[in-house]
Amino acid sequence: MATFKGFIIIIMSAVLVNNYVLQKFLGICPFLGVSKKLDQATGMSIAVIFVMILATAVTWPIQHYLLDAYSMGYMQTIVFILVIATLVQFVEIVLKKYIPGLYESLGVYLPLITTNCAVLGVTILNIDSSYTFWQSIMNAFGSGLGFFLAMVLFAGVRSRLESANPPEAFKGLPITLVSAAIVSVSFFGFAGLVENLFA
Amino acid sequence: MSGTVLGTIIIVVIGIICGVILTVASKVMAVKTDERIPKVRACLPGANCGACGFAGCDGYAKALVEDGVPANLCVPGGANVASQVSEILGVECGETVVSAAVLHCRGDIQATKAKMDYRGIESCKAAKLLFGGTGLCTFGCLGYGDCEKACSFGGVKVVDGLARIDMSLCTGCGSCAAACPNKLITVTPENVKVAVLCSNTEKGADTRKKCTNGCIGCKKCERECPAEAITVENNLAKIDYSKCTGCGHCAEVCVVKCIKPLDISAKKC
């Protein structure tokens, strides 16, 4: 039961309190680049969830059984980038061959997130937080969900921006960044949520 | 063994393993695609206008190669693209008709007036929802440029509250026609030489009060047309193009000058 509670806390914390996009400011490029339309935002987020879980599942054993065993912790970043990039390429090839439908919908976004900072961030922060394997997987899933939430919320905000008429100097990216900041501030309302979740 | 050497060995070994996995995977799980698809795709204009009825140029290229759909469906590409595509695929190239978009309204800000001070969303569709439009004439061009936004070729510009179609840029794809909430734009083939540039079906006196360029249904064109191709229906002149000879006499006699000669064959194709 305690582990189950721990998983819930990790997921809630990754989705709401330590949201990767809105609180840690990782993965900002897809957040601003692909959030114009809701369907694209959804496709991108599902790809991110998928890759985050896979990347964690592969990098956690590498860190613990290879790098730590030879006290090579400083090689973490370069090895993780290499492994994640290969993994995503491999998954893309497999999907193209066996699940063309999923490839059509995810295919465009997969190469975009090969070494996305949010994906790399999740894998490295999992190690830094000294999570166990399953805790890491839960954290990756929660972080992906948090990314999904941020993308979908922001796609909604942006569709309202389309029909708004801001001053000339704010049109385009400036007003997008301002609204992203406001959405980010709103997430501070969740601070302290996790501490009292099972209180 | 020193840390540097061990680190180098680890990264090289991981790199080689990754490389081998990817190479093997790409060979074993290679998906055969018809090499003609990218070739055909390269011939298409790439505007993704949808005039062919498929989802973008990629979709049309795929349908051309795999399903054998006719090669002359690309409206922006015209005869040039149709012949290139049919050459690659080795099929007969059908007839292509040159056509261009024509706006059936001449209600610019000199001819008609706004009935309200509109501060809402800058879109014809939104403005149309408000009492049928922001101008006096509810049939005419709203002038917020939905057609301009829809055009992938930069061929439509709103000037003085009226959309203007640049014949040198128009490809006849019909994206603007689909975007207009008043259905003012028609894709017109090149054999059409004159057109009625008004869509108001109200009585002459009402039309006149709203727009000085509107068709008042005076029937002068109907009487004067040597080919008897024009009839006035619902207070609006209508040209029967199966009878029209393109002499242009109606354009000369029209009192409000809402019938205009067209020169669609001059457009770029």
Image (tube, helix red, strand yellow):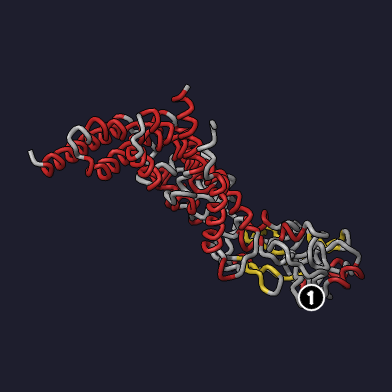
- The answer to which of B137 and A190 lies nearer the viewer is A190
Q: Residue furthest front?
A: A199
Label 1 marks a residue whose chain is B
Report whether B102 appears left or right of B130: left
| Quadrant in the rendering for residue B111 | bottom right
Report whether A88 appears left or right of B18: right
- The answer to which of B232 and A63 lies nearer the viewer is A63
Question: Does residue B201 lie above or below A111 as drawn?
Answer: below
Q: Residue furthest bottom?
A: B110
Question: Does residue B209 lie above or below B31 as drawn?
Answer: below
At 75% from the left edge and 70% from the top edge, which residue is drawn?
Answer: B106
- The answer to which of B68 and B107 lies nearer the viewer is B107
Q: Report the number of numbered marks.
A: 1
Label 1 is placed on what type of residue?
Ala
Residue count near mark 1 (Cα–Cα under 10 Å), binned few <14, some 14–19, many ≥20: few
Q: Secondary structure at mark 1?
A: loop
Report whether B52 appears left or right of A45: right
Residue A7 image offset from top left, x and y in percent: 46, 29
Residue B23 image offset from top left, x and y in percent: 25, 35
Question: Does residue B266 lie above or below B30 as drawn?
Answer: below
Residue B193 image offset from top left, x and y in percent: 69, 66
At 53% from the left edge and 48% from the top edge, which residue is drawn?
Answer: B56
| Quadrant in the rendering for residue B229 | bottom right
Question: Is there any visible trace of residue B117 in the rendered image?
Answer: yes
- The answer to which of A67 and B127 lies nearer the viewer is A67
Q: Quadrant of the C terminus of chain A?
A: top right
Question: Is there any visible trace of residue A43 in the rendered image?
Answer: no
Residue B164 image offset from top left, x and y in percent: 66, 69
Report whether A190 appears left or right of B251: left
Q: Residue furthest left?
A: B1
At 88% from the left edge and 67% from the top edge, which residue is drawn?
Answer: B217
Q: Which residue is mark 1?
A: B111
